[in-house]
Amino acid sequence: MIARNLADLGVDVIEAGFPASSEGEFIATKKIFEEVGDQVEVIGLSRSNKNDIDKTISTGISSIHLFIATSELHMKYKLKMTKEEVLNKIYESVKYAKDHGMIVEFSPEDATRTEEDFLFTAIRTAIEAGAERINIPDTVGTMHPFKYYDMIKKIVNFVGERIIVSVHCHNDFGLATANSLAGVYAGARQAHVTVNGIGERAGNASLEEVVMGIKKLLNYETNVKTWKLYEVSRFVAEMTGIPVPYFKAIVGDNAFGHESGIHVHGVIENPFTYEPISPEEVGNFRRLALGKHSGIHGLRKLLEEQGIYLSEDKLKIVLAEIKKLAESGNKVTVEDAKNIALKLMNS
Ligand SMILES: CC(=O)SCCNC(=O)CCNC(=O)[C@H](O)C(C)(C)COP(=O)(O)OP(=O)(O)OC[C@H]1O[C@@H](n2cnc3c(N)ncnc32)[C@H](O)[C@@H]1OP(=O)(O)O
Ligand SMILES: CC(C)C(=O)C(=O)O
């Protein structure tokens, strides 16, 4: 169901799973391909070994994302391989997948902590073996946008126009979206993202933020139907049981929420004053709230929507009551405002 939502949303590629990791992932990848493979490219993640590649191929999909770590840290402690062994694995696995007719995306895992010369050698090896896409993972989110921009720019120049460079950013320092945008600005033409930013540790770059950043901040195009973003985000939250944070950009409940009087006044006059994106553009909703920060303009609007028209003096009295209520620790609703106003009108 999530895959169908993503296909309808207009994403270019769905990384459906890691077929060699379990029977469930194998079946899911196969099923997702059968369901939406005619609408969107479906790709499977795989270690750089024959067993994983064979398993991925046997799902029926035709794109594979091969990875192997290239940083000293990962090679020494995790893979227990030398540089030469890793380069051999890259060449052999990419070549093997290509010989089986796969589209190959290759990731030097922990790329951003990899010694530069070796990273370029690994990338060249993957391309020589036939990889069409090179993804540069910031595996533990240790990049900042200025550094990642320089790195991606260099790689884009190195690989030339024929190869698509992709970015994959983790959010350990809260910079996954910023780094993804820096990478795209530097010439990457694919970004790995997840709905609501879900992922290991602090998560991955969020689809909603990266798509809207590309559209509104970089002024580039994507194929994503942005007005479906909120709906897809909520669907994934419901299916996974992982709620969307209240203050989450684009899809959070407060992403278009305004309480402060000055802001509400601005938004009433022209929403662009305090909304850099309109809620409709992403399928979210504007929410005007009442509280200790409220002002007359916002209160008047909310009451008039309830059919209550008060003089400026009366509005001031209602506003004072609302502030008092909020400052005593209560959440103030439109219903509260309405009751206060009606009481005043009847007194
Ligand atoms: C940064 C990333 O996101 S990487 C992808 C993360 N995703 C996953 O791990 C998918 C879910 N994983 C799993 O289901 C399991 O870990 C499996 C099926 C992949 C492997 O399970 P196991 O065989 O039990 O091994 P385990 O996970 O404990 O260790 C990983 C093994 O893969 C090796 N390995 C790790 N990455 C790679 C790679 N890219 N290419 C080849 N071998 C690799 C490790 O060196 C280790 O090898 P060893 O068993 O010879 O010591
Ligand atoms: C497999 C790779 C792309 C990965 O997930 C990472 O390095 O974070």
Image (tube, helix red, strand yellow):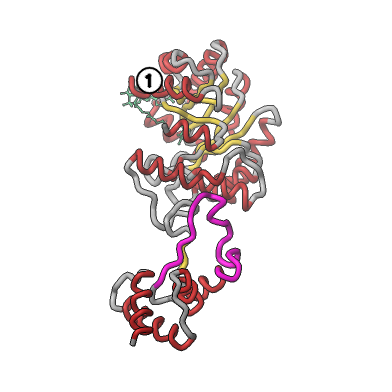
Viewer-nearest residue: 238 or 82? 238
Left or right: 91, with 303 as reference point: right
Mark 1 crowdedness (10 Å alpha carbons): few <14, some 14-19, many ≥20 = some
- Assign a secondary structure to mark 1: helix
Range drawn in magenta: 268-290
Compared with residue 262, is residue 283 higher up or lower down, i.e. above or below? above
Please tell me whether residue 285 belongs to the stretch shown in magenta: yes
> At 51% from the left edge and 49% from the top edge, which residue is drawn?
283
- Residue under numbered circle 1: 27
Percent coordinates x, y for residue 341 in the rendering: 38, 79
Q: Quadrant of ligand 1?
A: top left
> At 49% from the left edge and 35% from the top edge, which residue is drawn?
6
Compared with residue 327, is residue 232 higher up or lower down, i.e. above or below? above
The image quadrant where one finds the C terminus is bottom left
Percent coordinates x, y for residue 154 in the rendering: 65, 39
Left or right: 275, with 158 as reference point: left
Percent coordinates x, y for residue 255 in the rendering: 47, 58
> At 41% from the left edge and 14% from the top edge, which residue is drawn?
51
Residue sitting at the far top: 99
Viewer-nearest residue: 302 or 173? 302
The image quadrant where one finds the N terminus is top left
- Quarter of the figure with residue 12: top right
Please tell me whether residue 145 belongs to the stretch shown in magenta: no
Percent coordinates x, y for residue 169 in the rendering: 50, 42
Viewer-nearest residue: 104 or 309? 309
> At 57% from the left edge and 57% from the top edge, which residue is drawn?
278
Viewer-nearest residue: 122 or 84? 122
